[in-house]
Image (cartoon, grey):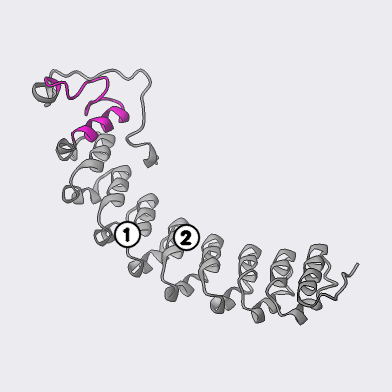
Amino acid sequence: MRDASRVGVRTVAGAPAPSCERCRHAASLLAAGACHPHDVCALAPSGRRMDRFFRSHPGEAEAYLGDDHWERRAIAARHAPLESIVALTEDRDEVVRRVVATRLPPEQLEVLMQDPDREVRISVAQRLDPQRLMPLARDPDYMVRVVVARRLPHGKLPKLAADPEREVRKTVAHRLPAFALGRLLFDHEAEVRRIVAGRALASDAERMLEDDDWLVRLAAVERAPVEAVRRHLDDPEADVRQAAWQRLQHSHGRTEPTE
């Protein structure tokens, strides 16, 4: 799989200059000094030179959208008119389709929701109207689902609370309103529960004071009711005991730490 970020900026060490004899621009741009095989050239074996060409002459980009070379098509797609790149949603190369996914208007992106390339689908998830993201919540790639979880409207977010991937559930835990975090209180991953404990309502935080993970209990101490926190002055973890004592000190100004 190619790295899309390199398209248009790649250099080829010692890349030779192409022959200008048969170039379609020989009698026009080349003759006028507007292109050069070693610097600004559509046919150069260098992404930088190609990109400089299409940046300088965007009107020429559309003519290269059917080029045999994937990188030339991808770079041309960055500069060609939007209406001319719609057909490239079915291009045989994923890098070309990635460029298309970053340029098409959001309302035209649904055709790429089932693209075989994860980077294309990630771009779609980043740009599609949030109200239309739910089909991607079932994407087989967890990073696509993470992006969906970052952008999905709150009302639909609970549907991802049971996602099999921890990173998706962590994102959900960061975004759900506090009153809706109950479904994640007992998540099997401590990392998810730590996020929940730091945002939960007081009543939910109290339940998390008994968590097996001391970092979850530490976060819960800051949000649980004061009287519930008092019971954890003898917590087996020193940091939790200290946090409980400090919470009580702040609330009452009387309690002494437990050794």
Horizontally, residue 238 falls left or right of residue 80, namely right
Q: Residues within 10 Å of mark 1 (few under 14, many from 20)?
A: many
Looking at the picture, does residue 114 appear above or below residue 153? above
Displayed quadrant of residue 147: bottom left
Can you tell which mark lies on residue 113?
1
Disc 2 element: helix
Q: Position of residue 198 (x, y in %)?
A: 64, 68
The kind of residue on which mark 2 rests is Val
Identified at 37% across, 59% down, the residue is: 125
Image coords of residue 58 (percent x, y): 19, 37
| Res. 146 mark | 2
Q: Earlier in the sequence, mark 2 or mark 1?
A: 1
Q: Nearer the viewer, residue 240 or 46?
A: 240
Q: Nearer the viewer, mark 2 or mark 1?
A: 2
As rendered, which of 148 and 54 lies closer to the eye? 54
Q: Give the SS element for disc 1.
A: loop
Span shown in magenta: 30-57
